[in-house]
Image (spheres, rainbow, N blue to C red):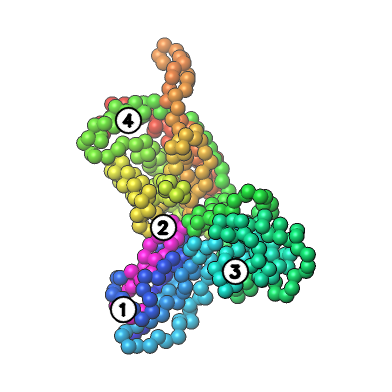
Amino acid sequence: MAEKTILMPKMGESIAEATIIRWLKKEGEPVAQDEPIVEIATDKVDSEIPSTAAGIVGKLLHPEGAVVKVGEPVAIIVGEGEAVAAAPKTQAPAVAEAVVNQVVQSVNTAKEFAAPAAVHNGGNRFYSPLVLNIARTEGLTIEELEQIAGTGKDGRVTKADILNHISNRSSAPASTQVQAPAPSATPAPQRVEVKTAAISLNAGDEIIEMDRVRKMIAENMVRSKHISPHVTSFVEADVTNLVQWREKNKASFQKREGENLTFTPIFIECIVKAIKDFPMINISVDGDKIIRKKNINIGMAAAQPNGNLIVPVIKNADNMNLVGLARAVNDLAKRARENKLSLDEIQGGTYTLTNVGTFGNVMGTPIIPQPQVAIMAAGAIRKKPAVVETEYGDVIAIRQMMFLSHSYDHRVVDGALGGMFVRRVADYMEQWDVNREV
């Protein structure tokens, strides 16, 4: 058979690359068509790439931990007994961006120690990037580091240990100094450069390495702020009727449908109605062109057990009734917590809702998920005294009130549209029919 090149597949309009987490096949092993060959991860979800042909794994083109762009070759499949030709000329060098379980790095030394940060001298002793940076600055040799008694976990040398050693040194360093690895000639993928202030470290401070997902979330948040000039409008909605209706119907809904009736599908229904009224909220920007989306796909931010956020998407939400929305919300939220979402289920959103009220917050200023142009945050529902107009005059009554926060891209959504949209969502919530049948 002719050689078959396995490519990094396209995984969504906003995903340009993925990290190779683990090879599921080794070179020389047989692989069946559609059998998973490698586990990859993006900033959204972990997934597996299946082999597009049956044969023998001839060559794995990237190491674990490498970041590979969409469309680049990742492996070559050959027939039994065949040799592997030279790698395709289109293959880009692997970029080691985020090695899984990478050692803890100091913010101050991240640029100098972008490669593996442990030093070994015939043994398995670990040195943190901070300790290595101090050793390099002070001219300590590796042999001298080996002689320092570590007071940290598993005998590790801490900042206090090395500083104490330096203060007690009686002679200059001998010869070989601790060197940072030479920078790779491989160009790093394009990133949004962020200059941060220098951070001083003191005794007792703890350095915690971001996990892979948190790094990518941070990068995407900075990129969104860089791309979209954010503006946020707020309204306060009287959702008393909506709250009373849900309280009256949630038990029968659970019994009949076998699903919990939360506020989220109710909010989504109101948002979908408002998008139909203001379709220029349901858009994306491509250079100097505006793309108005036909489908209304609502993203719903969901918290995972590790504290990271993921945004599953309800596709064609405008074609669903409240029962369908409730089923979709409950299913996606459950599988988000279990980390069982597929790539297709976390891409393609055209508008997003985040419920900050879940955490007891009354309002927030959410960041727009690119390439969308708007996002809404629903605050906590609280009982408050409010003025109510009646046929007998104004009265003060206890009402169920909540804030809605609407962040939008001011390049294409001006204050009038952004403000009218969030006001319309609030109107649909306030006008909820207390006698409505589920």
Q: Nearer the viewer, mark 1 or mark 3?
A: 3
Locate residue 61, reporting x and y percent: 45, 77
* Residue at disc 3, secondary structure: loop
CA separation, marks 4 and 3? 60 Å
Residue furthest top as drawn: 392
In this rendering, is residue 15 above or below 384? Answer: below
Q: Which residue is mark 3?
A: 119
* Residue at disc 2, secondary structure: loop
What's under tag 4, amino acid-wise?
Arg
User: In percent of the image, x 53 and y 70: which residue is there?
Assistant: 95
Circle number at residue 330: none
Q: Residues within 10 Å of mark 4 (few under 14, many from 20)?
A: some
Circle number at residue 45: 2
Q: Choose the circle earlier in sequence order: 4 or 1.
A: 1
Q: Residues within 10 Å of mark 2 (few under 14, many from 20)?
A: some
Locate residue 64, reporting x and y percent: 46, 70
Quadrant where the image shows the N terminus: bottom left
In this rendering, is residue 104 above or below 385? Answer: below
Q: Residues within 10 Å of mark 3 (few under 14, many from 20)?
A: some
Q: Choose the circle earlier in sequence order: 4 or 3.
A: 3
What's under tag 1, amino acid-wise?
Pro
User: In percent of the image, x 60 and y 72: which residue is there?
Assistant: 121
Specify start and end residues of the magenta stretch as a single range.
36-57
Circle number at residue 246: 4
**Is any atom of residue 379 visible in this view?**
no
CA separation, marks 1 and 3? 37 Å
Q: Nearer the viewer, mark 4 or mark 1?
A: 1
- Residue 41 within the magenta-colored segment of the rendering: yes
Q: Choose the circle earlier in sequence order: 2 or 1.
A: 1
CA separation, marks 2 and 3? 32 Å
